[in-house]
Image (tube, rainbow, N blue to C red):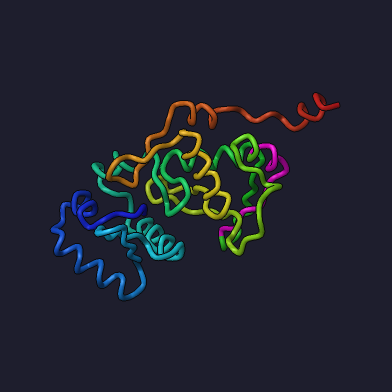
Amino acid sequence: MSPASVSELSSRTRLRQANLSNHLARLRAIGLVARRRHGRVAEYRLASLTVAHLVESVSTLIGPPKAAVRADLAEARTCYDHLAGRFGVALFDHLLEHNAIADSRRADGALELGPDASAVFRRLGVDLQGLRPSQRRLAYRCVDWTERRPHLGGLLGALLTDQFFASGYVRRRKGSRGLRVEPRAWHILAARPVERSRAKRVRS
């Protein structure tokens, strides 16, 4: 959830601002949302990554959203700070297919780096060699609530998202968590992986 004011949330949900303010006050009191003031405007967002995971998990259990909502969010959106929707799932598949990540189906969802991780992530704008130590999980499976398949969560998911924004591959839709995806971004994910045996012959 990107930061939003009460008026913005009211526009998105068509709920009265007074009712929204009361709900937000209750959510703040139990630590589910945080508020930050920018001058006279107060913006709200989910309080933490843990809360974001809770919301995404509940959404998955409830089931796909109504068709009107799917049209706005299904192609691409942010799931806290990583990419979700069809584009997020396609990115996950791309990383798997190109041996950048490996999924051993661990119960905690943790992913491992694949044998071609450095090259693939570098091509997407993320230098694995330059990563600083972090207490955050490196990569994990995050079940997508519209696609019902995994997209990439964790530090690597956030770094890729930042890079896609910086490169102009994805842009925010005004007043929505949904994203616009440039055709060139889909083109990047459509690239076929180089067979490892062939790659070794070329290098030799």
Where is residue 59 shown, x and y percent of the image?
A: 35, 57
> Left or right: where does residue 200 sit relative to residue 94?
right
> Left or right: where does residue 85 sit relative to residue 131?
left
* Residue in view at x 41 percent, y 33 percent: 181
Determine the image quadrant of residue 199: top right
Q: Is residue 66 above or below residue 189?
A: below
Determine the image quadrant of residue 180: top left
* Residue in view at x 47 percent, y 40 percent: 165
View extreme (front): residue: 39
Q: Nearer the viewer, residue 104 or 120?
A: 120
Question: Where does the magenta region start and end?
Answer: 109-120
* Residue in view at x 48 percent, y 30 percent: 186
Q: Nearer the viewer, residue 127 or 157?
A: 127
Q: Quadrant of the N terminus?
A: bottom left
Where is residue 66 shown, x and y percent of the image?
A: 25, 47
> Left or right: where does residue 103 sit relative to residue 178?
right
| Count of all numbered marks drawn on residues in the image | 0
Please say whether residue 165 is one of the residues in the magenta stretch.
no
Q: Nearer the viewer, residue 71 or 5?
A: 5
Where is residue 65 shown, x and y percent of the image?
A: 29, 49
View extreme (top): residue: 202
View extreme (right): residue: 204
* Residue in view at x 61 percent, y 28 percent: 192
> Left or right: where does residue 146 sit relative to residue 104?
left
Q: Quadrant of the C terminus?
A: top right
